[in-house]
Image (cartoon, grey):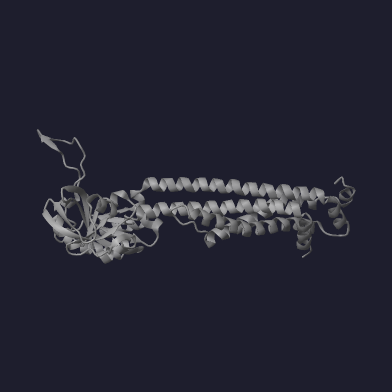
Amino acid sequence: MLALQLAYRFLKEGRTQTLLILAGVTIGVAAYVFITATMVGVGENMVSKTLGSQAHISVFDETQPPQPLITADGRSMLRIVVNPEPSQKPFDQWQRALTRVEATPGVTSACPTLSGTALALRGGGQQAIRIVGADPYRLRRVIDIPSNMVEGEFRPDADQVVIGSILAEELGLGIGRPMRIRTTSGEASVRVVGIFELGAAGVDGQWVVTSLRTAQSLLGRPGDITAIDVTVEELYEAEAIATRVAARTGLTAESWMERNGALLTALDAQSQSTILIRVFTLLSVAMGIASVLAVTVVQRRGQIGILRAMGVRARVILMTFLWQGALLGIAGAFLGTGVGMLAGKGLATVVPFDIVVDASTAGQALAISLTTGILAALWPAASAARMDPSAAIRGDG
């Protein structure tokens, strides 16, 4: 324990230098913790906002190929590629497909849905809408509409609908107010029982959510659906699970990762930039520790020479300075993590997402700070251990 005792005494005697380097390590670790927690919060917020109105995986029946618009002289000329309207093709044997999807490893829930376009009529105004029909108990496990209700209740049922906040505002609709819906199959009256706000303009301004049977009646598709929406246990395993679903069902399975390629690219770029910031932050911490300990070696040449002359081995001198680096790293890690957590809490009050320093981030900060402190102390420690005792005592070693 001699090396540890000497390290503590050296740090205590050089109090000003110790406090300065400790402040530098604390700031570096705090920056690491704060940046990591903030970037994690930003990424999670982006994903949650994107998936707030999307299923992790959507399973469709095979898409029909585009149809030629003009046929003449035995030749087909395709002027515009028009995707076929899903409502024109029934989802064959979707009950069997639903069973297979639910049995796929990694799938936590599945919800058959029917969606289609329509017009909402209110007084003299009209608005293009998208009817979304599903079993409410299944739907809430895929898209958490109940937690995002701003008025009324999530009770889509026969002739009852839940609509987005923007659509309600544009049509002047409130709880209990009637609304007429016009589709290619006719016109019907429904009653608004709830208003939600998912944070996506395309959803809040168009969606009219109702029961599956009501949607089938409105869209003229009795017993049919357009897709099976799926949630998975591991969000970033959605692509692999979608492949398994497609293999089991023989249907098209599209994951949220495939639909949101731009988002994943942005998250990857954010991750790479965060890594660079971390590296430069830790390099500055390492340089600070190394420079201060190098100065300490020069200042304590005489003491080091006396210790060596008294029989203290070079290994003990080496461990003394390594202990200094370790102690600075540990103390800086704990202080820096605390400062980073306080900074995160402060920022969380002005941004629309949580900034939480989890145990993993704190553990990484401690491990990295300790490792950085020891590695930064290696050169000064080796320099001190190589000193010739007599030269060090004379002051020219």
Residue drawn at 52 percent across, 61 percent down: 358
75 and 179: which one is in front? 179
User: Is 178 on the left or on the right of 153, as rendered?
Assistant: left
Q: Position of residue 98 (x, y in %)?
A: 25, 63
Pinpoint residue 297: horizontal percent, then vertical percent: 79, 50
* Residue at figure coordinates x 29%, y 55% from the top left: 58
Residue 239 place in picture, x, y as percent: 36, 54
Residue at x 65% of width, y 52% of height: 25
Left or right of 115, for residue 272: right
Q: Is residue 264 above or below residue 245?
A: above
Q: Is residue 294 above or below residue 370?
A: above
Image-based side of 348 in relation to 224, left or right: right
Q: Can residue 221 be seen in this snapshot?
A: no
Tally of marks: 0
Q: Which residue of the protein is positioned furthest toward the top in this rendering?
A: 73
* Residue 120 sits above or below residue 96 on the image: above
Seen from the viewer's position, the closer of residues 14 and 152 is: 152
Is 42 situated left or right of 290 in this image? Answer: left
Residue 204 in the image, given as x and y percentages of width and height: 29, 52
- Position of the N terminus by quadrant: bottom right
The quarter of the displayed image where residue 161 is located: bottom left
Q: Is residue 255 visible?
A: yes
> Which of the two residues, 111 or 181, is positioned nearer the viewer here?
181
Q: Quadrant location of residue 230?
A: bottom left
- Comparing 189 with 107, the one in front is 189
